[in-house]
């Protein structure tokens, strides 16, 4: 029986994430990348954030995920500051409004293009050699792996990611990233 690697086994390195953020073209796009990378929220969850979803006092985002399930995701102080700057005095509406129609938001395809352009500008390639370009969900995989590396419990990660069960989270992120497998193997085989 042939075993296939999961896409989630190819996260970005922390260094690559910071490089992408640093080389992103403009403030709005940088905030989009930060939200994807620092919260693990999905692309569609990013574009649907409104002013009323941000609890500035508690540093929390109210996220309406798949199946209209609501969860709360913490944000860092610098991300909160960036969100305030992005709203630019507005106290309603989408965080990332469409340029032409302020009552709607950026489209998913625009987020895809922002991520691809940011990766290209930073010179960061997808860690999976079978993939040509970066995509937004890759930041979610990376966030989950970084949380696990730093000892976050499975139930906490499940709640952050908005999964229905811990088994769903473990199935996606319970496998060792391929880069770690290769590194550990090289260390063990150093005697050979």
Image (cartoon, grey):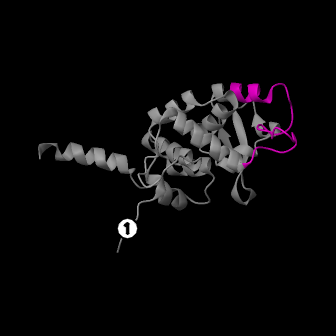
Judging depth in this view, the residue of 73 and 104 nearest the camera is 104
The reply to whether the magenta stretch includes residue 99 is: yes
Farthest residue toward the left? 192
The quadrant the N terminus occupies is bottom left
Farthest residue toward the bottom? 1
SS under mark 1: loop
| Residue plotted at (53% across, 56% down) | 169
Count of numbered circles on the image? 1
Residue neighbourhood size for the residue with mark 1, other residues' Cα within 10 Å, grouped as few (<14), some (14–19), many (≥20): few
Q: Which residue is mark 1?
A: 3
Provide the residue span drawn in magenta.
81-107
Q: Measured from the top left, where is residue 35 in percent x and y?
A: 64, 38
Q: Measured from the top left, where is residue 189 in percent x and y?
A: 17, 47
The answer to whether residue 57 is seen in the rendering is no
Q: Measured from the top left, where is residue 128 in percent x and y?
A: 43, 51
Q: Main secondary structure of the magenta part?
A: loop
| Residue plotted at (43% across, 47% down) | 127
The answer to whether residue 135 is seen in the rendering is yes
Determine the image quadrant of residue 117: top right
| Residue plotted at (58% across, 60% down) | 165
């Amino acid at each position: 029986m042939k075993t296939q690697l999961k896409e989630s086994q190819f996260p970005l390195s922390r260094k690559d994430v910071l490089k992408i953020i640093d080389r992103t073209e403009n403030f709005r796009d940088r905030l989009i990348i930060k939200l994807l990378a620092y919260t693990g929220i999905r692309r569609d969850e990013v574009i649907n954030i409104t002013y009323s979803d941000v609890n500035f006092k508690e540093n929390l985002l109210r996220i309406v995920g798949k199946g209209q399930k609501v969860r709360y995701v913490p944000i860092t102080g610098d991300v909160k500051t960036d969100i305030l700057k992005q709203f630019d005095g507005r106290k309603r509406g989408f965080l990332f409004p469409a340029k032409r129609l302020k009552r709607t938001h950026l489209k998913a395809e625009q987020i895809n293009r922002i991520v691809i352009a940011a990766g290209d500008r930073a010179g960061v390639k997808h860690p999976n050699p079978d993939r040509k370009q970066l995509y937004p969900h890759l930041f979610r995989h990376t966030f989950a792996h970084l949380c696990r590396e730093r000892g976050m419990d499975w139930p906490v990660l499940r709640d952050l990611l908005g999964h229905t069960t811990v088994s769903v989270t473990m199935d996606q992120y319970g496998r060792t990233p391929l880069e770690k497998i290769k590194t550990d193997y090289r260390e063990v085989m150093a005697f050979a």
